[in-house]
Amino acid sequence: MKVMWTSKKPINGLRHFVLVNKIKEKNKIRNLMVSVVDIEINLIISNEELINSGNWTEGWLNLPKNESISKDYLVFKAFNNSKEEINKIFINKNSIFNIS
């Protein structure tokens, strides 16, 4: 399973993600992606989006810091620090990140 991915566009200011879960629902596969820098930045995307859209590159690209962590990240953190609710991430039993 390919687990390291780089987004071609920043997502909340970050570009490096890991695929922690594959979710199979109604014959479709969705992927739970989590930022390497901040677990609060996570998203679920279809397999089609991840592999065929051209928006993602397999592996972590070696980017200058201002491209891998943009000012949008600081804006995201400033806004999110005022929130009290934190989304929880549950790891599937077959995820390589499941250590229990």
Image (cartoon, rainbow, N blue to C red):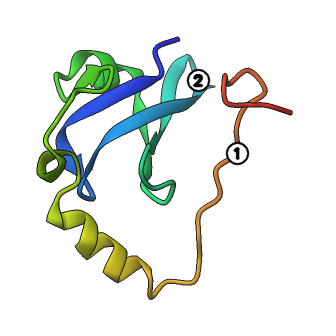
Q: Which residue is mark 1?
A: 90
Above-or-below relation of 80 to 63: below
> At label 1, which amino acid type do we have?
Phe
> At label 2, which amino acid type do we have?
Lys
Q: Is residue 83 left or right of residue 92?
A: left
Residue 18 in percent (x, y) is at 46, 33
Q: Secondary structure at mark 1?
A: loop
Which residue does the image show at 56% across and 16% down from the upper left? 27
Q: Callout 1: few (<14), some (14-19), or many (20+) C-alpha neighbours within 10 Å?
A: few
The image's mark for residue 30 is none
Which residue does the image show at 65% across and 58% down from the upper left? 88
Q: Which residue is mark 2?
A: 26
Q: Quadrant of the C terminus?
A: top right
Which residue does the image show at 27% across and 59% down from the upper left? 12
Q: Nearer the viewer, residue 29 or 95?
A: 95
Q: Nearer the viewer, residue 64 or 22?
A: 64
